[in-house]
Image: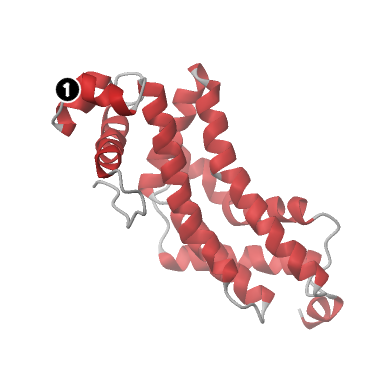
Amino acid sequence: MIDVKNRPDRDTRREAILDVAAEVFLDEGFDAASMSTIAAKVGGSKSTLYNYFKSKEEIFQAHIERYCGWQGAEMFQLLDDEVDDVRAALTRLGGRYLSNVMSERNMRHFRLIASASERSPDLGRTFYEAGPLRGARLLGGFLARMKLEGRIAVDDPMVAAHHFIGLCQNRMLKARLVNYVGEPTAEEVAAEVDAAVGVFMAAFGPSRDKVAR
């Protein structure tokens, strides 16, 4: 299935190339994929492809940035809503995050990027900065606002953000990466996130929240 989103980018040809390239990379792997294959599937010549991208690495980098942008928009826009209940906000975010990260398509992307980054560390850097690090910073900004409002008690919002992300994904991540377990059900995601939010709020919630639990 080709990723299709509503895009503000008017260059539909470039977007079409990235749509096709994503499938080629996922099906063949980064090393085996070629500019010739991508051009053939797009329906043009390599010279046309080179008008948009100078190399396979540049296409892959653009794909990573676009894919991470979509993932981040779907997950962290939940933090833009008015927040009356930090626990509920983290539960919404955690559910969306864990469902996306543990999905089969995302696991394929993660394995693909990890493999490619062994030879091309810049690709791994692009992924980390556009994906995990950007997400942690967005969550850290949210937690900083909640700290100012007295809704949580954290020393370092960024550290707390990494703690929350780790609580949500850590138990499942390695098992999913090696295909030891399949994509989690909605019920499994909900249970995992509920446990993660409970631990997080017990550690960082205001004293009244700790007493209540």
Q: Percent x, y for residue 64? A: 44, 37
Would you say residue 180 is visible in this rendering?
A: no
Q: Percent x, y for residue 163? A: 71, 53
Q: Percent x, y for residue 98? A: 51, 57
Report whether 35 appears left or right of 191.
Answer: left
Residue 63, quarter of the rendered image:
top left
Identify which residue, 165 or 151, lies in the foreground: 151
Identify which residue, 82 or 46, lies in the foreground: 46
Which type of secondary structure does the marked residue at label 1 adopt? loop
Residue 133, quarter of the rendered image:
top right
Residue 212, quarter of the rendered image:
bottom right
Q: Percent x, y for residue 65? A: 46, 40
Q: Residue at x 76, y 50 (%)?
A: 159
The residue wearing badge 1 is 45
Q: Residue at x 58, y 69 (%)?
A: 80
Report whether 91 appears left or right of 203.
Answer: left
Q: Residue at x 31, y 34 (%)?
A: 26
**Disc 1 marks which amino acid?**
Ser
